Image: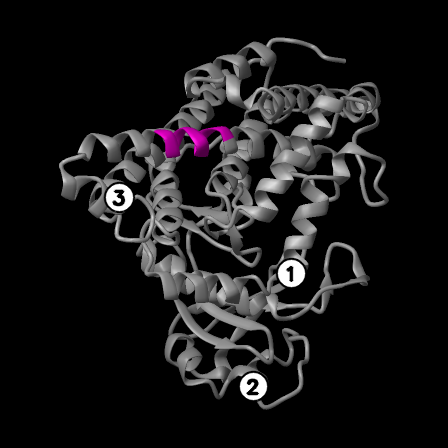
Amino acid sequence: MSDESYEALRPDTLAERLGAIDAIRKRVGDPASWQVREVGDGNLNLVFIIDGAAGSVIVKQALPYVRLVGEAWPLPLRRAFFEYNALVRQAARDPGAVPELFHFDEAQAMVVMEFLSPHVILRKSLMEGRRHPDLGAVLGRFCARTLFRGSDLSMKTAQRKADLALFAGNVELCDITENLVFSDPYFAAEMNHHTPGLDPIVARLRADIDLKIAAQHMKAAFANNAETLLHGDLHTGSVMVSDSETRVIDPEFATYGPMGFDIGMLIANFLMAYYAQPGHAEAPGARADYQEWILSVVDEIWATFSDEFTRLWRSERTGILYQASLFEDQGHGFGAEQARIERLAAIWRDTLGFCGIEMHRRTLSLAHIAEYDQIADEASRAACEARGLVLGRALAVGRANFNGMAEVLGLARQINGEDYL
C-alpha cells in the first residue's frame, strides 16, 4: 500500500488493499473470509475492525480533515506517524499498557493494531455504572512510567533531544489543544457550544479575569515546558477496559509538555463523570455509591502516580536532572528526597490547573463528553455541567492552595450538593 497515493479506506475495498500484508494475514487469515466493520465514533479518524478465520485486528487511518467538522477543517495525515511513534515509546516504557502494533503505513496514515476484546471504552462504562478493579492503580502507573521515563530524569540527553525534535513536528494537533482547551472556552469562539441553561454561569466565567489569567498561565506551561513526552489527549475516551484489564489508546496528540498535563486531563474526565452520574441514574440518588467509587479512582490515580514516581526517582534517575553525582554519591540522599518532594509538588499544582481548564473546555468548547451530552433532560444536564464548571474554576485559580487530593475530593462533594443555576 505504501507505494500508492493516499486513499481513504472503505469497508468494501479494505480486503483488496490490505490482503497482501503478511502481518495482517497472519493474525486474521485469508482475506476471502474477512468481515469488515467501520466503528470509528471519534472526532478525527476512520477506525475498522477486521474479523477473519484466524482472529481480528483494528485498522486506524487518519483523514485529511477533522472528521467532527468535515473538510472545512483540514488536518495533516502525519498525525498517524506521531501516534505510531508514541505507541512504540509507551509500549517500551510501560509494557502491556497499550495495544500491540502489527503494521504501520506512513503514506496511508494507517496503523494496524491489536483488537481489544471484550474491552469497551471507559467513558461508556462509566455511564453504565460499571466498576473496574485496580483502574486507578493501572492509570497512575501508566502516567508515572511514561512521563518519568520519557523525561530528562531518565533518558540519555541525545535520545531525549532527538525525540523532542521529532514530536515538535506535531504542530497542528498542538494548535488544536492550545486553542480549544486554553482559549476558546473563555470567549465566544466560533465553534463553541454549550447547554442553553448555562448562559448565566458562562457569562460569569468569561468575565472572570483571574480565571482567564490562570488559563493562560496553564497555556504558557503547556507551550513552553517540554518536560516529557505526553500522551496529549488522555481521557476516559482514550482508555479501554474489561473486567480484568485496562489499556490506553489514541496518543495522536503526543507532544512534549509538562508532566501534570496528562494526569490533569485524565482526572478532570473522572470528575466530570462524577458530576454527570445523576443524569444517568435509574432513580434519584441511585448512583451515590458509584459516585464515591469514581472519587476513589481519582484518589488512587494520584496516590499511585506519586508512589510510582517516587520509586522511579530512587531507582531510575539516570538522566541529566538531579543526578546522583550531586546527591547520593556525596552522601546527600536527603537532598535528592527534598528535590523529589518539590518536583512532585510542582507537578501537583500543574495537575490541578490543567484539570480545571479541561473541565471547562469539555463543557464550553467544541469537543464535549458523552456523559454530559447524553443526559436527555436539558435542565438536569445543565445542573450537572454547572457543578463541574464551578469545581474547574476553583482548581484552576486556586491550584496552589490545595494540600492534597483529600481536599480536592472534599470540595467536589461539597459542590455536588449545591445548585448553581
Residues tagged 2 and 3 counted as in contact (Cβ below 8 A): no
Cα distance between the residues tagged 2 and 3: 40 Å
Q: Is residue 367 visible to the viewer in this orientation of the structure?
A: no
Report the residue at 59% width, 73% height from top: 109
Query: What amino acid is labelled 3 in the image?
Result: Leu
Numbered disc 3: secondary structure: helix
Residue 189 highlighted magenta (yes or no): no
Task: Please identify, in this view, whether the residue under mark 2 or under mark 3 is nearer the observer.
Answer: 3
**Residue 155 horizontal side relative to residue 280, left or right:** left
Cα distance between the residues tagged 2 and 1: 24 Å
**Residue 396 horizontal side relative to residue 120, left or right:** right
Name the residue carrying label 1.
171
Q: Residues within 10 Å of mark 3 (few under 14, many from 20)?
A: some
**Residue 224 at what x, y percent from top left?**
58, 47
Question: In the picture shown, does residue 133 fall above or below 102?
Answer: above
Question: In the picture shown, does residue 364 fall above or below 78?
Answer: above
Name the residue carrying label 2.
2
**Residue 307 horizontal side relative to residue 135, left or right:** left
Report the residue at 59% width, 14% height from top: 416
Q: Write down the quadrant of residue 391 in the picture.
A: top right
Q: Earlier in the sequence, mark 3 or mark 1?
A: 1
Name the residue carrying label 3.
312
Q: Which residues are magenta?
A: 342-349
Residue 348 highlighted magenta (yes or no): yes
Query: What amino acid is labelled 1 in the image?
Result: Val
Q: Main secondary structure of the magenta part?
A: helix
Question: In the picture shown, does residue 282 fall above or below 25?
Answer: above
Q: Write down the quadrant of residue 169 in the picture.
A: bottom right
